[in-house]
Image (tube, coloured by chain):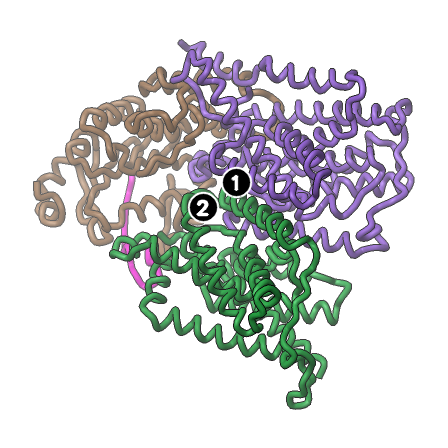
Chain colours: A purple, B green, C brown
Amino acid sequence: MRETANLFFRLRVRWSAWEIIFWLAWAGVFFYPGINLALLGQVLIWGLFAMSLDLVLGYRGIPSLGHAAFFGIGAYTAGFLGKYGWTEPLSGLLAAGLVSGSVGLMTGRIVRGLYGVGLLMVTLGLNLLLYDFVDRSTKLTGGHDGLQDIVIAPVLGLFRFDMSGHTAYVYILTVTFILFFGVRALVNSAWGLSLIGARDNSRRMTMLGAPVAGDLTWAFGISAFVAGVAGALLTQTTQFASPEMLSFQRSADLLVVLVIGGTAMLYGGFFGALVYVVLRDQLAALNPIYWYFWIGLLLVLIVTFFRTGILPTASQFWIRLTAHQSKRNKLPGGTSL
Amino acid sequence: MVFLTTLFNGLAYGFLLFIMAVGLSVTMGMMRFVNLAHVSLCMLGGYVMVTAMERFDIPFLATLPLAFLITGLFSIALERLVLRFFYGTDDLTQVLLSIGLVFMSISTIAYFFGPEYKPVSIPVWLTGQIDVSGLTLERYRIFLVFVGVILTLLILFGVERTRFGAMVRACVDNPRVASGSGLNMQVIFAMTFAVGGGLAGLGGALSASLLGLDPNFPFRYLVYMLIVVSVGGMGTIVGTLIAALAIGVADVCTKYYFPAAGGSIIYIFTVAVMLWRPQGLLGRKPGHA
Amino acid sequence: MAFGGVKVFNNLDFELMRGDCHAIIGPNGAGKTTFVAIITGLLSPTSGEVLLDGQDVTRYSVKQRVAEGIVRTFQINTLFDSLTPIESVVIAICQRDKVAKPTFRAIKHLHAQIDEAYALLEKFGLADDAIVATQLLPYGKQRVLEVVLAYALRPRVLLLDEPAAGLSTSQGRALFEQVVTLAQGTTVLFIEHDMNLVFSYATRVSVFAGGTVIANGTPDEIRAHAGVRDAYLGT
């Protein structure tokens, strides 16, 4: 019986078959003839970005309406490096992540103790401030037209970013997987469990003597780091950075992506990204305005019927279908598939 | 001189923001419901006005109460058919629901009216400028301030002096006790939504000529609505008024005197207020029933 | 202690002896919950001090007081709804042992904490439900978990706010049995309305009424106290 507990935690962190299939699929797709690698690369970047928000929103329960700010900071950092001579991509990624992460740490400190509308407004306000500044500072950032003349050297000195997008895809996939691996480990640690505890009941967490505010600051910092790297990935693979990358529009879209896919599952962001990017690609081609109608409808339906998001609902459905231990199941919240 | 004119223009803008936002403040304060789709109601009012004037040749002044009425009715329908099922859910769910509705409204309007800006023709006697004790003021803005003041007085009177107003105040102060003492919450919610939505529509109609009317209206003004409501304090009418006037004046003045700074000053101000008093200037501190 | 113009306590003197199982009883509105809030640091007294073993902890935050060993449970369950009991107790122990900083190390490696958590659940009779999500547990078991979470921190002072609230007589007795048996050496302070539990398990009783302690002593002394009868008991 004693072994139940240890077994529980071993199973909790074990890589399930679905996860392995998921990542193999992303790798395998590279070899599929005629596949649109650029589009899939976009999906991965959005997925990574959404995963960063998941850490703060899904696992810690803090809704942030301004996460694009971190994405944009990372994007522009990588852009500046590329434009002004530092063209090595890997270090550029790291720098972008660190800059963005520091801003994230500061944000975490600022929003501790806020909740509800006040929190939403502060995160939104900070995002808008940054956008406004970047959009206007034509001399510094290229303003509304964006940052041009960014040069990125070949990865590891060998792999150039070419038109076909092959290098870009492998680059994005590798970085995404590494960061995913790291965040997955974080979430399955005692610290990750404390985040979830604080989400469920921060009063009790305080009563356990936990550094709730400090943990939140770190969550923001790590989340911002990942978002910043995602932004840098976009800049490096497209050699372009624009204010749109840190707009409220993008923050709102990110929220939609994560909610569609499902929070607190890490993979939700990737599924949401897939739905979002593919839909946008198909529908927006038909007519850009009408695409908004369908996304809006999707959002309303999700919120009405799939309160937890597509992925958690689907996984619950699957679990019930293969119900061996229906009574012994945990609800999503720290579960990996 | 120029400063006074700018100030006056800011007041006109502020009153517009107030009329558009006051309904949102009350419903957020009363039902604790974050309804971002409120800004779509403003847009609806604008399009009602334009359609009435162009298709049915209804004179401008008459379209205003029409916009109020139709948007008000639409708000009741929206509340009864969709929104009321989400009372009591968490903030994020409501935000997402209402964003979804905003998206849908933008596309729907674009579908029926086209994506371009709609030209709004205001009556001749409201165009142009007029000299008022040395200042050259636009007639339309004088009209806005005039209407704004009257509406403000009506709203304050309605809330402070009528039975319905008292019921609304009770529901905002303490919903649990209010319903416990026999008030029919469903009816009060629906009526409040109707009036608030109607005002939003009226505000939208009034603003069409000044701010421009197109399907992207919600995206442009959602943030301002949220700022006014959160800075002023949810559920407080006077708070919303003060915040709206302050934001209106600040926005016009900074755009005129410090164009380089853009919207930054407003955003900095908002963030500062939210950090200092998260419940807004006149809002109630959380921890009430 | 005053809120605005309302005085809740007036010259409240209270002493808690080490190792005691001290009950606080009294009618509603007597200030019991305010008192507990002051001890744990949720509220700051407008005047007066809180001393722990001679150490002045009056200005200490909640977190600092927990570090000093002052831990409480709540009248209404304050649990982690989506987590299982084993996860909840493991967090508590990890926080106590300070092994919950940001790290990549999975929980499964923390054998000491996991084993201790499971042993604790066994002692309190929750072992069979260790991996059932808290919100799926019946109320009685949730109430027990509420106590376990506080107890897991090995507190110096364990404050239980109406631990048997909503429990049946036998459940309440079982809970107190467990607490008293396991709490050797821990000082327990509890608020209760169930007089049977109070008189069965308390070593000392204080009676709060109208913002002050009107009686203080062993259960027998309190039972015989005339003033207490008037103010409160009527049994």
**Residue C138 falls in image quadrant:** top left
Question: For the point 28% across and 23% down, which residue is it?
Answer: C178
Question: For the point 53% across and 47% down, which residue is it?
Answer: B98
Mark 1 neighbour density, 10 Å: few (under 14) some (14–19) many (20 or more) = many
In the rendered image, the vertical position of residue B145 relative to residue A59, given as above or below = below
- Which residues, given as a range, are shown in magenta? C1-16
What residue sits right under mark 2 in the picture? Answer: B82
Q: Position of residue B241 (x, y in %)?
A: 51, 69
Chain under disc 1? A
Badge count: 2
In the rendered image, the vertical position of residue B56 relative to residue C144, given as above or below = below
Question: For the point 74% across and 46% down, which residue is it?
Answer: A244
Q: Position of residue B123 (x, y in %)?
A: 63, 76
Judged from the image, the secondary structure of the residue bearing numbered disc 2 is loop
Q: Position of residue B200 (x, y in %)?
A: 52, 62
**Amino acid found under the numbered disc labelled 1:** Val
| Magenta stretch holds residue C15 | yes
In the rendered structure, the answer to whether residue B44 lies left or right of residue A86 reads: left
The reply to whether residue B286 is in sight is: yes
Toward the bottom, the furthest residue is B133
Badge number at residue B269: none
In the rendered structure, the answer to whether residue C235 lies left or right of residue C182 reads: left
Front position in the image: C25 or C140: C140
Q: Position of residue B169 (x, y in %)?
A: 36, 63
**Amino acid found under the numbered disc labelled 2:** Val
What residue sits right under mark 1 in the picture? Answer: A300
| Magenta stretch holds residue A285 | no
Q: Are marks 1 and 2 in contact (CB under 8 Å)?
A: yes
Mark 2 neighbour density, 10 Å: few (under 14) some (14–19) many (20 or more) = some
Main SS category, magenta section: loop
In the rendered structure, the answer to whether residue C35 lies left or right of residue A101 reads: left
